[in-house]
Amino acid sequence: MIIPVILSGGSGTRLWPLSRAQYPKQLLPLAGEKTMLQETVERVEKIADIGPVCCICNEEHRFMVAEQLQQVTDAVGDIILEPVGRNTAPAAAVAALRVQEKFPDAAMLLLPADHVIRNSDAFAEAVAFGKKAAENGALVTFGIVPDAPETGYGYIRASVDDGGAGSVYPVEEFVEKPDMETAEKYVRSGEYFWNSGMFLFKASKYLEELEQYHPEMLCACKTALEKAAADLDFLRLDEETFTACPSDSIDYAVMEKTTSGAVVPLDAGWSDVGAWSALWDVKERDASGNVAKGDVLLHEVKDSFIYASSRMVAAVGIDDHVIVETADAVLVASKDRVQDVKAIVERLKSEGREEANTHVRVNRPWGSYETVDRSDRFLVKRIIVKPGSALSLQKHYHRAEHWIVVKGTARITIGGKEVVLREDQSTYIPVGTKHRLENPGKIPLELIEVQTGSYLGEDDIERFDDKYGRAAVAENGYSAKK
């Protein structure tokens, strides 16, 4: 059996402003109609002898990850929550320990959640070839057959022969991202592959190698898992232990040291979608070489990527550009400079700006909310509550709230009393009053919330009861709301 382990902890900063810390690229429908996480799940379900999905994610993304998995598969095993990111080697170790406990003889297929593979059948065939090697003790990685010199990827050098399709080659070395001249030499030699960051090995074999080359990491991961706590449908790793775990990639921690490394060539339309130019490359283009999504008007524009999410975007007389519009930000970049978008995100973070972390619309386990207007002493939000969902029982110390129902039915608790409101009805929650909002109906509940008061920060909340297990007192503005 193969247990797919999907790593969903990345932030995707180079795809800002669509990808943000609280809503990263793997949770967005960038390459198709479904999110990248969902496409990864559907891709592995085509593989023979596949087992339940294990997903490792940032705890702040847990409800979105769970909901997206449930929409595409019934075979969800573990959703493991990382309190902090520690790179791929510890994540793989935790997954391997869990897999070995539940499926002792199984192999692990370790996949990032944010890759595009256009030919899923070719990918399934490559996994089948790799499985045989993994069962014989190899640590298998998938090397992308390069179609051009590329300086944005690391490379794998292999002992290539003329074995043809289905061959598995010993790994000679991993090499860092090269300059263009070196990349051209690599491609001409036929001995080098792009490093995909995808792996297949028996859980027991990976743990043996990690114990040999990085025993302190394995020890920390064992303890973090032993002290892990069940939280609804999630397994929450022990924060103190996992935070103290060394941070390293599988490549550095194991693959560059092991004598059991093997590579399976993969030619399946792969991309890690690491920047807007990569997304332009994998999307279907028009006769002028443009990718346009949303309300976009173009005049004499060539080889560009234009994305509009909330308003019309018009472009005239430009070539090789990227324009991405969201409700609160617009990115304009030359296509050959999109790797530098990360510098913009770093600046936003250093200035403490919300645009680095959240969108105007913020997802919550019960639904979503978005800011419509704000000033010093008032804030207007549009709130959507999913059928059967409820916000926490809570109170605020500095603000009052006015709620106007515009769609659906609301069951509202205010100070111990319960009232049911329907469309065009409203209510008022005074400062310091316990309250809860629920949707007892069959359709989404939509309401307008008007906050008034001296302090309107999202951390002004005390929870008394929460079906989603969130903290009683919010620690920051990103986990606080309702």
Image: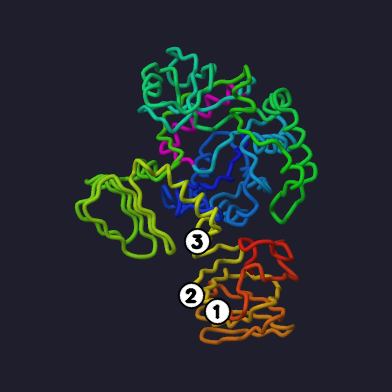
Q: Which badge, 3 or 2, comes first in the chain's sequence?
A: 3
Do callouts 1 and 2 mark residues in contact (Cβ within 8 Å)?
yes
Question: Residue 167: percent from the left, percent from the top?
Answer: 48, 19
Question: Residue 105: percent from the left, percent from the top?
Answer: 70, 29
Indicate which disc residue 359 carries. Answer: 3
Q: Which badge, 1 or 2, comes first in the chain's sequence?
A: 2
**Residue named by callout 1:** 378
* Quadrant of the drawing holding the C terminus: bottom right
**Residue named by callout 2:** 373
Residue bounds of the magenta highlight: 115-134
Q: Is 241 situated above or below 401? A: above
Q: Calculate the distance from the C-alpha at mark 1 to the C-alpha at mark 2.
A: 8 Å
Q: Which badge, 3 or 1, comes first in the chain's sequence?
A: 3
Residue 361 lies within the magenta run? no
- Given residues 8 and 185, the one toward you in this image is 185
Question: Residue 71: percent from the left, percent from the top?
Answer: 54, 54
Judged by depth in the image, the label closer to the viewer, 3 or 1, is: 1
